[in-house]
Amino acid sequence: MSDPLKAKLFLEKFYEVKELVRTVEVDADDVCYRIEVYKHYTNPKTPFVASYFVQHKVPHPASQVAGETLDSFLLDTSLPWVAERTAEEALATALSFLGDRHPKRVKKIG
């Protein structure tokens, strides 16, 4: 069977159809981000887009140990929209935005 996402019949039934093609996690300044790169099937003007998620630790509801947490990633809408021609360009743009927000600090020795 051929890929159903390439069939126009299915694409005309939905407002948006996208496929997750890559996930990257980045630690920056004690903040963990997850970048998800998607291939857009329904909007040829933005064939690849990226979304940012920031990690939050929430108390574990059934915790027997004080301070036990669940890790949760929540969408971060404060970063700029990413739309590029290739998945690699979308990821590079997203990484660039995070690098500008969290420049790596050099530790001083001595």
Image: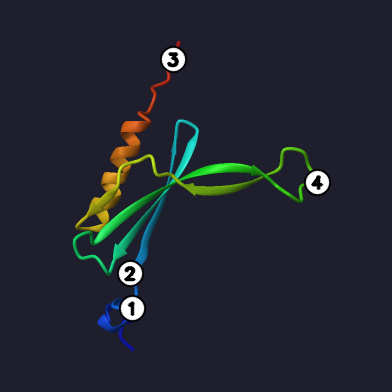
- Camera-near label (1 vs 4) is 1
Q: Foreground: 29 or 57?
A: 57
SS state under label 1 = loop
> Which sits earlier in the primary sequence, circle 2 or circle 4?
2
Return the x and y of residue 74 as percentages of the image width and height: 50, 48
Q: Earlier in the sequence, mark 3 or mark 2?
A: 2
Mark 1 is surrounded, within 10 Å at the Cα level, by few (under 14), some (14 to 19) or many (20 or more) other residues, namely few
| Residue highlighted by disc 3 | 109
Choose top left, top right, bottom left or bottom right for residue 3: bottom left
Q: Which residue is rendered at x = 33% and y = 35% of the image?
A: 99
Q: Are marks 1 and 4 in contact (CB under 8 Å)?
A: no
Name the residue type under label 3.
Answer: Ile
- Compare marks 3 and 4 and give the one earlier in the sequence: 4
Q: CB of mark 3 within 8 Å of CB of mark 4?
A: no
Q: Residue at (37%, 58%) from the top-left corner?
A: 22
Marks 3 and 2 sit apart, C-alpha to C-alpha, by 55 Å
Q: What distance separates the C-alpha of mark 2 from that of mark 4?
A: 45 Å
Mark 3 or mark 1, earlier in chain:
1
Residue that numbered label 1 is attached to: 13
Residue 62 higher or lower than 43, as above or below: above
Judge depth for marks 3 and 2 and give the one in front: 2
Q: Nearer the viewer, mark 3 or mark 1?
A: 1
Relative to residue 52, is residue 17 depicted above or below? below
Q: Which mark is residue 64?
A: 4
